[in-house]
Image (spheres, helix red, strand yellow):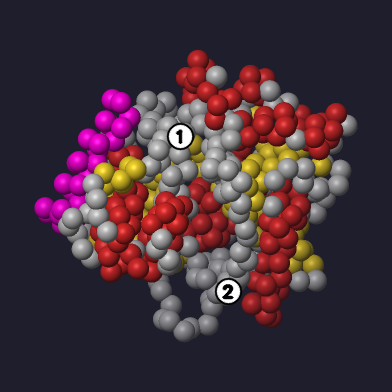
C-alpha cells in the first residue's frame, strides 16, 4: 500500500508454493494462488486500520508467461498453473522452427516453451477436464493474471492485459490483439482466450473491507517494475533480479530485433504505448537455489556477501538453470562449472553467471540511438553488493540501486495512480503518511556503484564468453 507520495505505508505478504514434478515441469496450485490474493487483501486492509477507507484503487501484477485453464461458468481451475519456468512442451514446439521468423515479427518473441502457446496446447491435448470443458463451451485459457481477475473481481470478467497477453506467442504486437493466424498454427481456439483490453481498464471490483475496491490496472511483474521510479528513461536500462533476471530498455516502437533480444510492450493506456527491448536470464534466484541444493549450501544468499568480497580464484559457471534464455535461447542447455573450487567459490561463480548473462544481453542494447548512461537494479538479489559492483565492472556503466527494491509493487502503484508527476521532496523518516490523494511521486536518491578499472571479474567475463561460444558450438 502506497500513499500519494509513493511511500510504502503498509505491507502484507502471503507465500505460495511451487512443485517441480520433473526437471522441465514447474507448477503452482490455482486455488492456493487465488486464495492468497483474497487473504493478502484482508491483511493489507487490517494493516492500514482506519486509513483503509481512504484507498481509492488497486492494481494486479503477476509473473508473465504463466498460464492456467478454468471453467467460465463456475470459475474453477481445470489445470495447474504452468509456471513461466515450465518447459514441458519444448519438443512439440521445436517443430515450429520453420515459422520462427513469422512468429517473431508478429509477437516480438522467439519460439520458446517458456511462453504460453505450447503450454496451452499441452493442456488441450492432455487434460481430460480441459477437453470436456471445451466440448461443452465452458473453457477459458489464459495468462495467470486473467485467471486471478476472473477469480477475485466482481462478475468473473474474462480479460487479458497487454503485458501478459503478449507473452503467449498468440498476441500480435502491432494489432494489440490475438493473432488469428498464430492461434490457428498453434491449435489454440481464439474463442477460449480472454478479451484483450488496455493496461488501465475497469477490471471490476475486488473485496476490500466491507465493500469493494476498483481494480484499475493489470500488468506483468517485470512490466510494472520499470515504472517504480516514474516514467522510464530512454538513457537507462532496468534490471530486476528475482527468480529470473530481466533487463529492459525503453524503445520508441516495436522494431524488429535480430540479436536474440525480445520486443515487448509494458503498458498501453489512453492511447499511449510503452515498448521495450528485453533480455531474459531464466536462472537468477533459481540458479542460487540450484546451487544451494547441488552444493549443499544452506542459506546461500546470506553467506554470499562475505564470499563475494573475495574477487580471485573463482571458477566459471555456464548457467542453463531453467533453460538458457536471451540472447542464446537453448531450452535444455546443461549447466556446468569450468574450473574447480570450494563450495563458496562455486557459489560466487553462480552469482557471477547472472551478471555475465545480463552483460551479454546488454551488448544488444548499446546499438540504440540514445546513449546508455546507467543501469537501475531492483529485486531481491539486488541487495547483494557483490552483484551490483560486478555488474558495474563488466558493463562499464554506473549501477544505481534505489532504497526501495520491491520495484514491481511500487511501479504498479505508480500506474494505478495515473502516472503522477515525479519529484524528490522526501518526507523525514517517521513522519505520518502524506494525504491519500495522488500528489508528487517521490524518487529518492539511489546508492551508486561505479566501474572499477582492472577488476578481476572483467577478465573472468571475457573467458566466460569464450567458453559459452565453445559450449554452444559456435
Q: Quadrant of the C terminus?
A: top left
- The image's mark for residue 202 is none
User: Which sits in the foreground, 229 or 32?
Assistant: 32
Where are the magenta residues, as a range? 451-474
What residue did someone put label 2 on? Answer: 10
- Name the secondary structure under disc 1: loop
Residue situated in front as seen by the camera: 187 or 154: 187
Foreground label between 2 and 1: 1
- Residue 222 location (% of width, % of height): 49, 49
For the point 47% across and 19% down, the residue is 101
Which residue position holds label 1? 332
**Relative to 212, does residue 172 appear above or below in the rendering?**
above
> In this rendering, does residue 261 appear at all?
no
Question: What secondary structure is the stretch in magenta mostly built from?
Answer: helix
Tell me the distance, in whole angstroms, between the alpha carbons under discs 2 and 1. 42 Å
Badge 2 local density, few (<14 within 10 Å), some, or many (20+)? some
Would you say the residues marked 2 and 1 are in contact, meaning their CB atoms lie under 8 Å apart?
no
**In x, y percent, where is residue 448?**
27, 63
Position of residue 243 in the picture relative to residue 389 (left or right) = right
Amino acid at each position: 500500500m502506497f500513499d500519494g507520495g509513493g511511500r510504502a505505508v503498509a505491507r502484507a505478504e502471503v507465500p505460495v508454493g511451487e512443485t517441480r514434478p520433473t526437471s522441465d515441469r514447474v507448477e503452482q496450485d490455482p486455488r492456493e494462488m487465488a486464495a492468497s490474493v483474497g487473504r493478502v487483501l484482508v491483511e493489507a486492509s487490517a494493516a492500514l486500520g482506519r486509513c483503509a477507507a481512504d484507498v481509492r484503487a488497486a492494481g494486479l501484477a503477476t509473473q508473465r508467461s504463466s498460464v492456467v485453464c478454468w471453467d467460465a461458468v463456475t470459475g474453477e481451475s481445470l489445470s495447474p498453473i504452468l509456471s513461466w519456468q515450465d518447459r514441458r512442451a519444448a519438443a512439440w514446439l521445436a517443430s515450429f522452427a520453420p515459422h520462427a521468423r513469422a512468429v517473431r515479427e508478429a509477437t516480438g518473441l522467439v519460439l520458446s516453451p517458456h511462453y504460453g502457446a505450447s503450454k496451452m496446447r499441452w493442456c488441450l491435448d492432455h487434460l481430460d477436464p480441459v477437453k470436456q470443458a471445451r466440448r461443452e463451451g465452458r473453457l477459458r485459457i489464459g495468462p495467470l493474471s486473467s485467471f486471478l481477475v476472473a477469480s477475485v473481481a466482481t462478475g468473473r470478467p474474462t480479460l487479458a492485459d497487454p503485458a501478459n497477453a503478449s507473452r503467449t506467442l498468440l498476441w500480435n504486437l502491432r494489432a494489440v490483439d490475438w493473432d488469428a493466424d498464430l492461434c490457428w498454427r498453434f491449435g489454440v481456439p481464439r474463442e477460449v482466450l480472454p478479451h484483450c483490453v488496455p493496461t488501465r481498464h475497469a477490471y471490476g471490483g475486488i473485496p476490500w473491507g466491507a465493500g469493494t475496491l476498483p481494480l484499475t490496472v493489470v500488468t506483468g511483474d517485470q512490466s510494472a517494475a520499470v515504472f517504480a521510479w516514474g516514467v522510464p528513461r530512454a538513457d537507462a536500462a532496468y534490471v530486476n533480479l528475482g527468480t529470473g533476471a530481466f533487463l529492459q530498455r525503453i524503445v520508441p516502437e516495436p522494431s524488429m530485433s535480430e540479436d536474440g533480444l525480445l520486443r515487448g510492450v509494458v503498458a498501453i493506456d489512453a492511447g499511449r504505448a510503452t515498448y521495450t527491448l528485453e533480455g531474459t536470464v531464466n536462472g537468477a534466484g533459481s540458479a542460487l537455489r540450484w546451487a544451494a541444493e547441488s552444493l549443499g549450501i544452506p542459506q546461500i544468499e546470506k553467506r554470499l556477501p562475505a564470499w563475494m568480497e573475495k574477487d580471485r580464484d573463482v571458477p566459471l559457471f555456464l548457467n542453463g538453470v531453467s533453460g538458457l534464455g536471451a540472447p542464446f535461447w537453448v531450452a535444455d542447455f546443461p549447466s556446468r562449472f569450468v574450473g574447480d573450487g570450494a563450495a563458496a567459490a562455486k557459489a560466487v561463480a553462480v552469482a557471477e553467471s547472472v551478471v555475465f548473462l545480463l552483460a551479454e544481453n546488454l551488448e544488444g542494447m548499446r546499438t540504440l540511438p540514445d546513449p546508455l548512461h546507467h543501469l537501475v537494479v531492483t529485486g531481491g538479489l539486488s541487495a547483494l553488493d557483490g552483484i551490483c559492483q560486478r555488474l558495474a565492472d563488466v558493463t562499464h556503466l554506473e549501477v544505481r540501486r534505489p532504497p526501495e527494491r520491491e520495484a514491481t509493487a511500487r511501479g504498479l502503484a505508480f500506474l494505478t495512480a495515473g502516472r503522477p508527476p515525479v519529484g524528490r521532496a522526501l518526507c523525514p523518516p517517521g513522519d505520518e503518511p502524506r494525504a491519500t490523494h495522488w500528489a508528487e511521486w517521490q524518487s529518492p536518491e539511489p546508492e551508486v556503484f561505479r566501474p572499477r578499472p582492472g577488476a578481476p571479474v572483467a577478465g573472468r567475463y571475457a573467458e566466460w564468453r569464450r567458453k559459452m561460444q565453445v559450449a554452444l558450438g559456435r
